[in-house]
Amino acid sequence: MGDGRSGGGGANRPAWLQQYDLVGKIGEGTYGLVFLARTSHRKCCIAIKKFKQSKEGDGVSPTAIREIMLLRETCHENVVKLVNVHINHVDMSLYLAFDYAEYDLYEIIRHHREKLSHSINQYTVKSLLWQLLNGLNYLHSNWIIHRDLKPSNILVMGDGEEHGVVKIADFGLARIYQAPLKPLYENGVVVTIWYRAPELLLGAKHYTSAVDMWAVGCIFAELLTLKPLFQGVEAKATPNPFQLDQLDKIFKVLGHPTPEKWPTLVNLPYWQNDQQHIQGHKYDSHGLHNFVTVPQKSPAYDLLSKMLEYDPRKRITAAQALEHEYFRMDPLPGRNALVPSQPGEKIVNYPARPVDTTADFEGTVAVQPSQPVSSGNAASGNIAAASVAPSRSMPRSMHVVGMQRMPNAGISGPSAAAETKRSKYGNAESWLSSTEEALLRKPNGGHTCLFEIA
Ligand SMILES: Nc1ncnc2c1ncn2[C@@H]1O[C@H](COP(=O)(O)OP(=O)(O)OP(=O)(O)O)[C@@H](O)[C@H]1O
């Protein structure tokens, strides 16, 4: 690399970008692009997530910056490490650099379904779930609710010291997305609703960490069956349209929710307002046992049904789930989820992440001068301080997958408008001292309750 494609090229490259050699684009989500890069000195792999600008071009909000500062403080083996943050003052776009993970649950499940045509072994399912719950328990204990858990956000490390270790990605980013970054509905990007909890689908105004446990239940079922459990068709109006089809899919499996079993159901807006489809329509439950491959009397089934409990206050918490009998019986969960479960069992070789090597970065300017790449972690709270994770596995193969080439915005210096924004938002460190965010509310029935949806 270092061939000039890496973000505007040569000597003009902003200081922070010079520590990375771009390999290519590895993905595109609702809010941005994800790139694979290597640190120039140590050749560690890094995933750089670039947030696209909203149509209004509002840039990065103070709330987003404050939120990112909090994310930089998180440190747990099962939570992906945010190693660096950069803001491009030219257009106030945001770059977050994370530890790179070769696999994710979306691709692992897909590989089993489409290539191997056999289920994921019990040890791997249990180890993936165990680690996911450990990471989630850490986040919830630190008042962070993910809000967008789905298989593509659950990463798994490739070859190396952390082989087979699960890393939760994209946690806390929902708060950054809220404003001013907007989802790109107009560009045809689909927001997955398959893992969304019923209370949110029914218009609940409060998030609790129980929404993440619902998503974990859906992911657990998908690991067992290789198929998404509730595959609703998304309603596309903005903002927050009523997702009737998703509720329909859930009710068909789990039966109609009742105020007897879920007392606060009667307060939910869509339960109150949509008499015809929701209250009035009676669903006969087909029963969860008809959709999953584990016996109804097994600990796995018991845990799954506790995760898919309608009433968020009764839904099992991550801490409680970790204590469940399922994790105390053979096969016991392990740190490397990808090793064979029994001697003699064949190891599954999952495909390396495809990389579009034709894509390139846009030029960027750091919030403050970056420090040289070092092996240690940077001082916390320093938004642009460079810190690079210990060596990561390199992708085993690189190939172009025919994605679109990114436009190159260039780095010709900030515009007057950008200068105004820089003076408004550029002093990132000042946000660290700001503690006025009402982060802590009383946990509700064991679940962390943090967010109020506008
Ligand atoms: N740290 C990382 N290492 C390796 N791949 C990553 C990393 N973070 C994200 N990815 C991958 O990049 C791709 C795009 O991720 P991104 O989070 O932008 O979108 P998404 O999860 O597919 O959708 P959404 O935007 O709706 O969350 C996904 O395949 C994801 O697994």
Image (cartoon, rainbow, N blue to C red):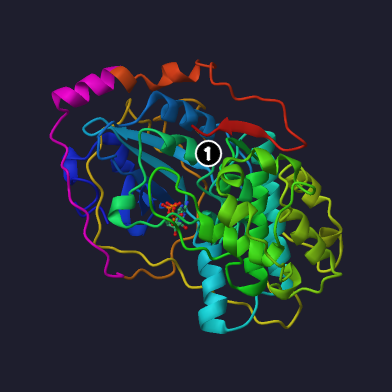
Magenta segment boundaries in residue numbering = 400-423
For residue 112, side relative to residue 283 (left or right): left
Label 1: state its secondary structure.
Answer: loop
Number of marks in picture = 1
Residue 18 lies, with reference to residue 89, above or below; the image says below
For residue 150, side relative to residue 332 (left or right): left
Q: Position of residue 85 (x, y in %)?
A: 40, 35
Residue indicated by mark 1: 172
Badge 1: few (under 14), some or many (20 or more) residues near its Cα, within 10 Å? some
- Residue at (75% x, 42% y) in the render: 263
Report the amino acid beneath label 1: Gly
- Residue at (86% x, 64% y) in the render: 329
For residue 70, side relative to residue 284 (left or right): left
The foreground one among 89 and 390 is 89
In the picture, which quadrant includes the N terminus? Answer: bottom left
Query: What is the quadrant of residue 181 in the picture?
Result: top left
Query: What is the quadrant of residue 60 in the picture?
Result: top left
Which corner quadrant of the figure contains ligand 1? bottom left
Residue 262 lies, with reference to residue 330, above or below; the image says above
- Residue at (62% x, 82% y) in the render: 118
For residue 199, side relative to residue 352 (left or right): right
Residue 262 lies, with reference to residue 454, above or below; the image says below
Q: Is residue 187 magenta?
A: no
